Image (cartoon, rainbow, N blue to C red):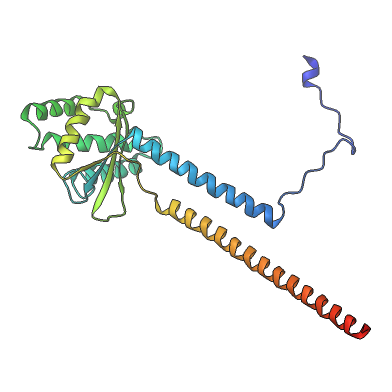
Amino acid sequence: MESWFAAPAPASANDRQVRPRVGGSSKEQKQLLKAVAKLTLRNAQACRNMESTVFVTYILPKAGAYSTDSTAGTEAGQLYAQRARAAGKNHTLGQPSSWLWAALMKVLAMDENISEEKRQQVKSYCDAVSDPCSLFQTVLYCRISKVYDQSKVRLQVAVTPELQEFLTELQRGLEANGGERKFDPPPRGALERHVQVQSRGKVASESRQIGVKVAANSRQFRGKVASKSRQSRVKFAAAN
């Protein structure tokens, strides 16, 4: 064990490893950028496929009862942000998903499209949950985000089986208020489309450059052949 703490012998000049040069040729860098772009698009596609499998997704009217312009979105977003700023980094407010889920449950408890019995069950559930942190292990994900159509928003929810009954009632409330369930993977986002367009543009540009070079080389080859042919004819005529 004593040898563990002994100072290592200084390395000689011959033992020192030369650090390889960082970088590479322009061609290698282009190939690397292409590979990164392809990998990015593949990973983005995998994430969108996973979202459609894991999350319950709805497209909602932006001004609807359950979306961002309503009590649910405003209360969950603004109230959480204000209290989190006031409490600092070490706050005990739980996750934003918990607050949005709680706000959705409050709207559901007042939704007349749901039976009175179910509304009472939702109210009892809301009264029983006093600490937002207690939802951390049951509300896995609950977020509202923008979509291409500015008059609508996207709600994505994932909960444990303990809350499946309430999620089912929430889905009924969403559909009764103009919500549309989505099962397929979401469309490509702006960043993913940008990467795809740029990647295709570079490939097309390089293809055009290769075509121009091939055409130029072909013209040069034809010119050389024609020149040699003329020289041969001149020599033949001079010899005769």
Residue extending farthest right: 239
Q: Residue at x 70, y 69 (%)?
A: 218
Reply above or below: 150 against 178: below
Q: Residue at x 82, y 39 (%)?
A: 17
Closer to us: 139 or 124 = 139
- Position of the N terminus, as image quadrant, is top right
Closer to us: 221 or 160 = 221
How many discs appear? 0
- Position of the C terminus, as image quadrant, is bottom right
Is 146 left, or right, of 37 in this rendering?
left
Closer to us: 231 or 216 = 231
Is 168 left, or right, of 148 in this rendering?
left
Closer to us: 174 or 31 = 31
Measured as percent of width and height from the top left, residue 172 is found at: 16, 35
Q: Hey, which quadrant is residue 160 in on the image?
A: top left
Q: Hey, which quadrant is residue 178 in on the image?
A: top left
Reply above or below: 25 against 155: below
Residue extending farthest front: 240
Measured as percent of width and height from the top left, residue 83 is found at: 30, 41
Q: Residue at x 77, y 19 (%)?
A: 4
Reply above or below: 229 against 155: below
Q: Residue at x 30, y 45 (%)?
A: 82
Measured as percent of width and height from the top left, residue 44 is found at: 45, 44
